[in-house]
Image (cartoon, helix red, strand yellow):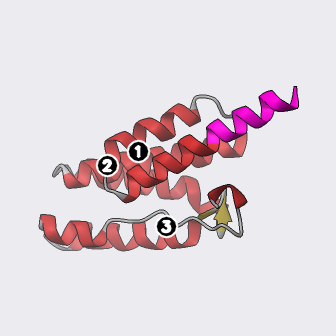
């Protein structure tokens, strides 16, 4: 039985890392789908955290697609879901991600953002090897 658990864990971390790479490459649609695939199999706090990442991915997708109001709604909801997991959860630097999202929301609400400026402000999911040795 432990081999099955290890295989499931390896599969989880492989897909999680893939989702993070998609997100950080600004492929938010794919990141959303990958995080959602993980979310469907989880429960409890991990499920809530993944739901936050799904909403943040969708919010970023809406923002780069020009849907400002949808982006703001999803970014805010996603941020509210992950903020309680600060400073780190699942090897993700939650503090850094929340700060990036707050900055993006502020600029989106207060300024006209052009595509080249949006890209400069998009959040990045930073992983910590110390917090999660799966990233090695």
Left or right? Give the position of 123 relative to 97. Answer: left
Q: Which residue is mark 1?
A: 31
Q: Nearer the viewer, residue 42 or 133?
A: 133
Q: Which residues are magenta?
A: 1-12
Question: Which circle marks residue 27 in the picture?
Answer: 2
- Image quadrant holding the C terminus, namely bottom right
**Residue 88 position within the rendered picture, expressed as x and y whole percent measured from the top left:** 66, 66
Q: Give 7 or 76, whichever is nearer the viewer.
A: 7
Please identify the quarter of the rendering in which residue 64 is found.
Answer: bottom left
Disc with the residue nearer the chain's start (2 vs 3): 2
Residue 99 visible = yes
Cα separation between marks 2 and 3: 17 Å
Whole-Å distance between the Cαs marked 2 and 1? 6 Å
Q: Which of the 4 quarters of the picture holds residue 7?
A: top right
Image quarter in which the N terminus is found: top right
Task: Determine whether the residue tagged by mark 2 lies in a helix, strand or loop.
Answer: loop
Where does label 3 land, which residue? 97
């Amino acid at each position: 039985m432990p081999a099955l658990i290890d295989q499931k864990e390896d599969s989880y971390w492989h897909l999680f890392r893939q989702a993070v790479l998609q997100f950080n490459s600004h492929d938010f649609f794919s990141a959303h789908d990958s995080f959602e695939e993980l979310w469907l199999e989880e429960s409890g706090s991990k499920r809530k955290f993944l739901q936050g990442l799904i909403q943040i991915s969708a919010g970023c997708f809406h923002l780069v697609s020009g849907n400002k109001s949808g982006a703001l709604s999803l970014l805010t909801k996603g941020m509210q879901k992950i903020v309680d997991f600060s400073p780190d959860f699942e090897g993700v630097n939650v503090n850094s991600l929340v700060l990036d999202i707050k900055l993006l929301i502020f600029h989106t609400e207060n300024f006209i953002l052009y595509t080249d400026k949006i890209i400069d402000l998009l959040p990045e999911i930073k992983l910590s090897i110390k917090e999660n040795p799966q990233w090695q």
